[in-house]
Amino acid sequence: MKIIQYTEVNPVIFDSGMAKGIAARVVIGKNDGADNFCMRIFEVSASGCSPRHSHEWEHEIFIHSGTGEVYNNGKWTPVKAGSIVFIPGNEEHQIRNAGSELLVFACLIPSNAPEL
């Protein structure tokens, strides 16, 4: 069993190219013996965003705090604390902060996908 505060994990910072203002943490992954899933926590600063991309694996996302928008199928959809997002594999997507507060979300991916 593992119980931690997510902020105990050192973040990987993405702030160049297509990714802006993102602190990413693998909080449960291969190093924990997780055989099926990887859980990551992302903090996206005001005006920050993930790159627009697609890949084979799906995402399950829970928006913990803040407000943002998710790009999918050519349009942006607003999300806020409590929102749930499912992104199937091979769908182009992007997440951006649409507010002035930190956008924080948990993201689950299959264990065979790159953790970050």
Image (cartoon, rainbow, N blue to C red):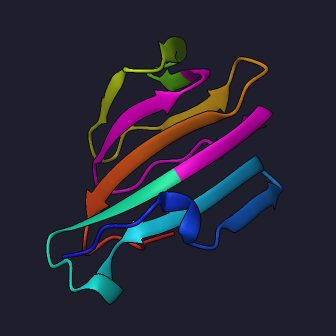
Let me know if residue 106 appears in the view.
yes
- Residue 103, percent from left and from top: 62, 32
Residue at the spot x=49%, y=16% of the render?
79
Image spot of residue 42 (x, y percent)? 56, 50
Front-most of residues 98 and 55? 98
- Residue at (60% x, 23% y) in the render: 66
The image quadrant that residue 62 belongs to is top left
Horizontal and vertical percent for residue 16? 85, 58
Q: Nearer the viewer, residue 39 or 91?
A: 39
Quadrant where the N terminus lies? Answer: bottom left
Left or right, residue 14 beside residue 83: right
Main secondary structure along the magenta-highlighted residues: strand
The magenta segment is 42-69
Front residue of this view, candidates 88 and 14: 14
Asked if the magenta segment contains residue 28, the reply would be: no
Q: Is 4 located above or below residue 53 in the figure?
A: below
Q: With respect to residue 4, does 44 lie above or below?
A: above
Q: Position of residue 49 (x, y in %)?
A: 70, 38
* Among the 4 quarters of the image, the one containing residue 95: top right
The residue lying at 52 percent from left, 24 percent from top is 70
Closer to us: 51 or 40: 40
Drawn side of residue 74 relative to residue 30, left or right: right
Residue 28 falls left or right of residue 78: left
Is residue 50 visible from the viewing direction of this image? no
Residue located at (46% from left, 38% from top): 92
User: In the image, 8: left or right of 46?
Assistant: left
Up the image or down, 48 lies above or below 90; here it is above
